[in-house]
């Protein structure tokens, strides 16, 4: 087991206005898993991801990764841990418009003061792996949304993170771009053995995972393991969404 989430809780606000975003959640994730986190809007998906990635501190409980209790680290050491071991992809890409594609992708290595040769090697490898070599010199505003997200994935992965966190990575993409991105993420999971934690409300996106945990109102409601067939898994996810309820997050009609 790589990640042990032990009895974490998180409240926002105070007293009468307090929101109990996460209530005593425990969860284990193995090395190389591709874990999906699903649940209705406001269920606590982003808060849970942010706590596991140390971007947010839990009020109670521990996050233990490879035997190290990250909740015991000071902010500065947590930031260093994130830089060295974790990669992030968000719905909004978070690329810097003032830099071109190459400059964006190599940024994590440049910030870590990696040597030039390593930067070139890793850059070429990543661009080839994700099939975006042609985009190297482009400006960010010359890219389609799908291309932007694959560039964001390249940047998240250039450091060879042990864990990739993806929060609604397909949320801004059309179905074709989403499919391309998900195939690349799955390939990276298999080829690089990167552990992936992905929050999504979209059943098709979640069907790429090896396991999906469903949260509702800040607690784990259930989980499903991919039976080894994506279509079947997709159906199981849809059925679980129906069981949980929770309004408009059912993205069933999306025709991929
Ligand atoms: N910074 C914050 N301040 C106050 N309340 C917050 C904050 N962040 C999250 N919350 C609340 O905590 C709960 C869980 O939010 P969270 O964003 O984790 O849910 P989610 O499942 O990711 O939702 P969505 O699918 O809509 O993104 C919600 O009720 C939300 O309003």
Image: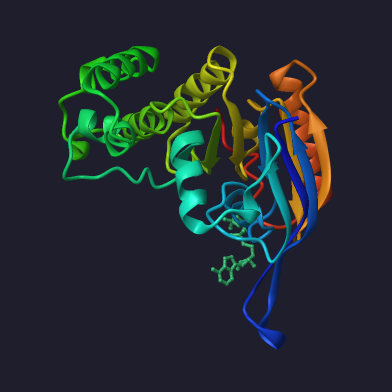
Which of the pair 106/188 is nearer the observer?
Answer: 106
| Image position of 96 with respect to 192: above or below | below
Q: Residue at x 68, y 25 (%)?
A: 31
Q: Residue 101, how many percent across, how many down?
A: 23, 31
Residue 34: quadrant of the picture = top right
- Identify the residue at horizontal 68%, vertical 79% (top origin): 18
**Residue 215, percent from left and from top:** 75, 51
Residue 133 drawn at (x, y percent):
26, 16
- Please give left or right for residue 90 compared with residue 13 in the image: left
How many numbered tags mark residues here?
0
- Colouring method of the image: rainbow
Q: Is residue 93 above or below residue 209?
A: below
**Quadrant observed for ligand 1 in the rendered image:** bottom right
The residue closer to the viewer here, 109 or 88, is 109
Question: Where's the C terminus, which quadrant?
Answer: top right
Residue sitting farthest toward the bottom: 16
Q: Quadrant of the N terminus?
A: top right
Q: Position of residue 29 (x, y in %)?
A: 73, 34
Name which residue lies at 18% across and 39% down: 99
Tell me: 12 left or right of 164.
right
């Amino acid at each position: 087991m790589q990640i042990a989430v032990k009895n974490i809780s998180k409240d926002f606000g105070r007293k009468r206005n307090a929101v109990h975003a996460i209530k005593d959640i425990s969860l284990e994730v193995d090395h190389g898993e591709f874990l999906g986190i699903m649940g209705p809007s406001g269920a606590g998906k982003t808060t849970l991801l942010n706590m596991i990635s140390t971007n947010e501190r839990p009020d109670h409980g521990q996050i233990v990764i490879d035997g190290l209790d990250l909740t015991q680290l000071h902010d500065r050491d947590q930031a260093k841990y994130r830089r060295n071991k974790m990669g992030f992809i968000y719905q909004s890409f978070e690329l810097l418009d003032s830099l071109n594609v190459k400059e964006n992708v190599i940024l994590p290595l440049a910030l870590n003061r990696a040597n030039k040769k390593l930067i070139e090697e890793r850059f070429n490898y990543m661009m080839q792996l994700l099939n975006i070599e042609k985009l190297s010199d482009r400006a960010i505003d010359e890219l389609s949304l799908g291309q932007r997200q694959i560039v964001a994935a390249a940047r998240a992965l250039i450091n060879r993170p042990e864990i990739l966190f993806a929060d609604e990575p397909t949320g801004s993409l059309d179905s074709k771009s989403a499919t391309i991105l998900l195939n690349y993420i799955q390939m990276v999971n298999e080829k690089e053995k990167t552990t992936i934690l992905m929050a999504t409300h979209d059943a098709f996106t979640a069907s790429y995972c090896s396991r999906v945990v469903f949260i509702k109102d800040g607690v784990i409601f259930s989980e499903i393991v991919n039976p080894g067939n994506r279509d079947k898994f997709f159906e199981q996810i849809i059925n679980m969404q129906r069981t949980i309820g929770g309004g408009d997050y059912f993205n069933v009609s999306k025709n991929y």
